[in-house]
Structures are given as C-alpha cells and as structure tokens.
Amino acid sequence: MTAKRIGWGAVVLGFLAFFVAVPPLTVRSPIVVIVIAVAAMAAGSYAITAGEKRLGWGGIIAGMIGLVGGYAATQSGVANLERVVVWGALGAATLRYATPLIFGAVGGLFSERAGVINIGLEGMMLMGAFFGAWGADVTSSWLLGIVIAIAAGAVFGAIHALFAVSFRADQIVSGTALNLLAVGVTGYLFVEVYGDLGTPDDLPSVPNVSLPIDWLPLLGDIFGDLNLLVWLALAAVLMTWVFMFRTSWGLRLRSAGENPLAAETAGLNVVRTRYLAVMASGGLAAMGGAFLSIGFLHTFTQNMTAGRGFIALAALIFGRWRPGLALAATLLFGFGSALAQRLPVFSPSGAVLFQALPYVLTLIAVTGLIGRSIPPLALGRPLPRN
Amino acid sequence: MRRPLHLIALLAMVCSLFVAACGSEEEEPATGGNKTAEETPAKEAIKVGLVTDIGGLNDRSFNQLANEGLERAKAELGVETRVLISKANSDYVPNLSTLAQQQYDLVIGVGFLMADAMNTVAPKFPNTNFAIIDVDATTMKAKPTNVSGALFKENEAGYLVGYMAGLYLKDEGGGTASSVGGQKIPPVDAYIAGYQAGVQAANPEAKVVNGYSQKFDDPAPCKELALDHIAQGAKVVFQVAGGCGLGALDAAKEKGVQGIGVDADQAYLGDQIMTSALKKVDVAVYDEIKAVQDGSFKGGDNRLFDVKSGGVGIGETNEVGAKYADQIKAEQDKIASGELTDIPNTVQ
C-alpha cells in the first residue's frame, strides 16, 4: 500500500516539476524544478524496489518529462510562456479538440464490446458531418440535423454489421471499405448538392451553452461557453458507463463480445445484439462528425474529419475499452493538439514536430502508466456457425 | 446460404465490369475536344491535364480556380481536358506521370507542394509540356526546359488587403491584425509578409500576429488559431490556408471581427468578409493553355502575374471595407506604376 502511494506521489511530483515553471506560478529558478523532478524520480525508484514496478516507472518518466519541460520553461521568456500557457483557453480548446474523439471512442466502445471491430468509425463520422450539415440545411433545424446525422451513421453501421456479422466478412476489410465509401459518398453529394460555393453561410448551428460562471477564475474560462454537443459528449461517456456496467442490456452486449457461443446458448440473440451495437456505434460516431460540421465549424468541407475516427479508435484501445479511461485518453489527445498549436511561438520551424506531441504523449503513457490492453475476447470473430 | 452469396458476388463483379466498360465508352465522345476539332479542322484539339494538390477540387480557392481556368479553356479554346485529384502528397508523381504517359500536350501541376514531384517527372518526359503554379521554373534543381512556372506577386495582393486592415484598425482606435497561414511555404509567406507590411504602412502603431496551422484541408486547427488570435485582441483575420482557412473566417464571423479571404473572391462566405486577396490562378492556367495552343509556350521560364498585369489584386468589399476603397485604389496605382516596389515577401 505504501509503495503504491509513493508511486503515485512520484507521478504527481513529476508533473508538479513542470507545473511550477509555467504560469501562474512561473518559478524562474531551474534549481526548484530540478529538485522536484529528482525527488519524483527517487520516489519512483523506491516504488520499483518495493514492488510497484509499473507505477514506479510511471513516476520516473513523469519526473523526466517534468525535468525537461520545466527546465525548458525556466529558460524561455515569460512573455512567450504567458502566451502559450493560458490554462482557461487551453482547457476550452482541449475540450473542443476532444469532442469528436469522445463521440468516436464511445461509439467504438459499443461496437467492440459486442465483438465487432469498428475501423469504419472514420467513415461513420464523416457521414455524420455531411448529413448533419445537409439535414440542418434542409430542415432549418440543428436538432433535426443531429437526428439525420445519427440516422446516417446508424445506416452505415448497419452496412458494417451486414458484412461483418451476417456475411462474416473480415471486419477490418469491411470497415476500411466503409471509410473509402464515405469519402466517395459525401464528396459526391457535397459537390452535387452544394456545388462550388459550399454549404450556405446561414446553416443552422448547434448553440453554445452559456453558464453564468464567468466569475470563477479557471472553470469559468473553460466551461462558461461550450457547445451543447461538448456537454452531450461528456454525458455520453457517463451514460455509456451506466449502460455497459450497470444494466442487464450492457451485460448482454458484453457477453456477445466475450463469449458469443455461451451467450447464444444462454438464449441471447447475438446477431441482433451485434447489429444494434454497431448501429449505435455509427450513430454516436456520426454525432462527432455533426459536432465538426454544425457544432464547431458551421460548414462542411470534403473529408473534414481528417483521421479523427482513427484517433478515436486509438483512444479506445489506449483506454482499454473502458468509458472513463477512453475519455481520459481523448482529453490527452485534445490537450496535446491544443498545446501543439501554441508551441510554435517558441520555434516556428519546429511546428511540424510539435504536431506529433499527442502521439508522443500516448506512447509515454502506454509504456509507463497503462499496462497491456486486453481486448474483448471475441473481438473480430464472427459467431461460429451452428 | 453459401451458394447464393457467391452467386451474388460473382454477378456483382460481372455487372461492375460491364458498367466500367460502358462508362469509358461513353466518356470518349463526351470530351468536348473532338467536336470542336471537327468544326475547325484546321486546328487540332490539344489535350490538357491538370493535377490538383491535396486541397482537392472543391477547396473554394486555389484548386477550384485552376479548374475554372481549365473549364474556360475547354469552352473557349476547345481543348480536351482531364483532371486528376491528389489525395496525398504521394499521389503527385503518379498523377503527373499518368497524364504525361497518355500523351497529353500540357500537364499542369497546381501548387508549390508538388515542386519536387514536377522536378522528378518533367525530365523523364522531355516531349511533354508542363506548367506549374507557384514554382520558379528557373530555380528547379533538374533545370527542366519543358516546364513553365506561373509566379504570382502574392505580396502585392497581401499588401493591399493589409493596408485596408491597417486603416480599419486606425479607425477602431488600435488592435491587432492576425494572419492564419497553412504551411510555411513561399507563396503563403509572401501573402503574409505583404499583409504585415501593408498593415504597418497604413497604421504604424498596429500590432500583427501570425500563426501556421500546418494544414490546408482540415478547418478545425485554423479556427482554433484564429480564436486564439482574436482572444489576444485581433480585430482582422486574414486566412492564407485554403480549405483550412474557412475555419479562420468562421471564427471571425462567430466573434464579430473582420475576415479577409484568399486566392478566390470569398465575399459570398458572409458579411464578415471585409475583402479578399485575389490570385488569378484561373488566368494563369488559361494563359498557359493558350500559349501551348498557339505555339508560344516557353519552357524553362516563368510567367509573372502581378498587380500591374491584373494577375493579383483585391476582391469585393463589405460595408466596412468599402469606406477605404479610394485609399486602396491609390496604393494599387502606386504598385502598378512602380512607385512602390520594396514590399517584402518573406516573414521575418
């Protein structure tokens, strides 16, 4: 128990080493940073010798990050630091970057927990982006736009289920085909419907939720004026957790992904369960796309999801197929993107390198803190024939 | 269950073969060139191929303009055309090569991003004419003699819109002028450098802030950058990032500040568009095609498009921008007459 506590202490100290060096504390002396970081690494080594290997290594790595980041911060100008590290703005940008990923990861969770690999998340998201914009435009209502986006995603999910569950095709091939199909379908419809000028500039958009918390120092900046879909994404995580782990439906869905044969023997209709799960997956991923087109950007552009579906899938795996951890992973990606966008203040030529930050953070987190990811047992395996 | 499925799959494959065959047959007579060739037998229709960069045909700026030039040439000059859309940077070499192998008379590469690809492909097809937008053909490493570069003085267009932004900031009693670039490449930087010089010339007290999204297609990072600049006090946002920049202009709309479009006239995006910095890629494409047709095409050299020739300029203005029309016209004349020449084209 004590070793575990010391291990966690090491992780916290490591991040503290970085935290003291940036605004609002902005400690300018590198010695402070070095002392804290070394303490973190020492605590980490102690935890390793006491048996908490993973946590201990996590502490050592956190200490190293703190040392490098914190030292770099003490050596750079205060003005630059204050432009980059505005916690309120960083927090809001993190949530905006993370929202499509949250929807995607939660959607992927439904499908994969039921035993169907969903690499088609990207395509389902793109369908949601287009049909959200188109639906909102045609019906003049953002609410119906979201509904139509969800329907389009669910239809795409049903196609995936048709191939992956009914035809027992390779699920990765089916998902990849859907991604390519989505690029084609949305690209064609976009040019066909909107031509050269693109979506109209009075496209109905999902409103922001203004909370009367401006006076709160940090939380006001982060949560004061977020898009409704950001809140829905966070709610979706909670609801997914309740559904998956606190209801009998969730248990059935998971049993279809762990041991479909046993589930079938016990009287569960695995095929129907998987169909519904993949369709729900498509609907949720489509909401992520709708956030991009009618929530955040108020326009549709071709292939606008730009790989977010794949990153959502990565977040899901990184989050060990659990809603809470997947949320943490998407927030880490989001924070990495938000920070990467501001770092070129220090070095314009390093801008391309900074774009890799979210992935580097992931690698560190995967090797350090999170252990091996164990997927649902029957993931990727169709239901055996009678 | 097994057999019917296989049959369906087989049937689908056979059908698709037929469709493909029919499709290509139908396409042949549709490619306008032949007809015109029959009407005017003296002149044989030339074949022109265009390769877009990763922005895609519908980017509402750069590539779309190139296609408009191509379409105009098809209608007015009766040439036969084909467009290949690049989905990734790795598509440039195969796309350019495909068109060259198919004996196209002129192959046009749209954009600086395919400079290296052009440098690789052009020397391998010495009998094909190539044109490339935004690349100086005289400085290409392989020194190909069959490539014509179309160069634009983006800094002049940037200067004009920057001057307008500077005047606006003066009337607003101060503020910052923001620019959101795609990648740090010469044509983007030329716009931004001109813009910053224009802002400072009109209003020496104005501040400038600049950022690069590293993207030309995904609008989200550009919007984030613009929101960040606006939070720092930017009252004008100039986008130089193609499809990505649409996000920056959306940020301007959302926060009620002025936006400036790029390449194409983007006034249709909404009332927030103060004006646009124009770069007439359509004219360049048309001119290159015309040169090949009438035999005046010259490889290993450049065509220059500037304010004087009308190849770059300033677009439609909104109500706010209209107030400065006379002053901008005066600056435009100064540039055209050669009185104002030292506009920078690199961002310091």
Image (cartoon, rainbow, N blue to C red):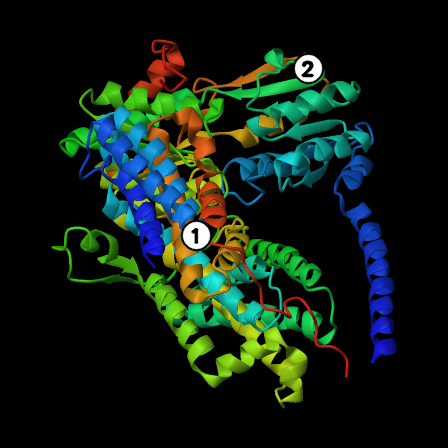
Q: CA distance from mark 1 to mark 2?
A: 72 Å
Picture quarter containing residue A349? top left
User: Which residue lies at the image location 77% right of the left edge and 29% below the top edge?
Assistant: B100
Residue B57 image offset from top left, x and y in percent = 58, 43
- The nearer-to-camera label among 1 and 2 is 1
Task: Tell me the quadrant of the picture where the C terminus of chain B can be found.
Answer: top left
Pointer 2 indicates a residue of which chain? B
Number of labels in the image equals 2
Neighbour tally class for label 1: few under 14, some 14-19, many 20 plus, Cα within 10 Å: some
Element under disc 1: loop
**Which residue is label 1 attached to?**
A51
In this view of the protein, can residue A16 be seen by the observer? yes
Residue extending furthest toward the front: A50
Along the line of sight, which residue is nearer the eye, A221 or A258? A258
Mark 2 burial class by Cα count in 10 Å: few <14, some 14-19, many 20+: some
The type of residue carrying mark 2 is Gly
Residue B298 is tagged as none
The location of residue A374, given as percent across then percent down, is 56, 62
Residue A236: image location, x then y, percent:
40, 69
Task: Examine the rendering and report whether any part of residue A200 can be seen.
Answer: no
Q: Quadrant of the N terminus of chain B?
A: bottom right
Q: In percent of the image, x 62 and y 83: which residue is there?
A: A263
Q: Which mark is residue B299?
A: 2
Residue A38 vertical position relative to residue A56 in the rendered view, above or below: above
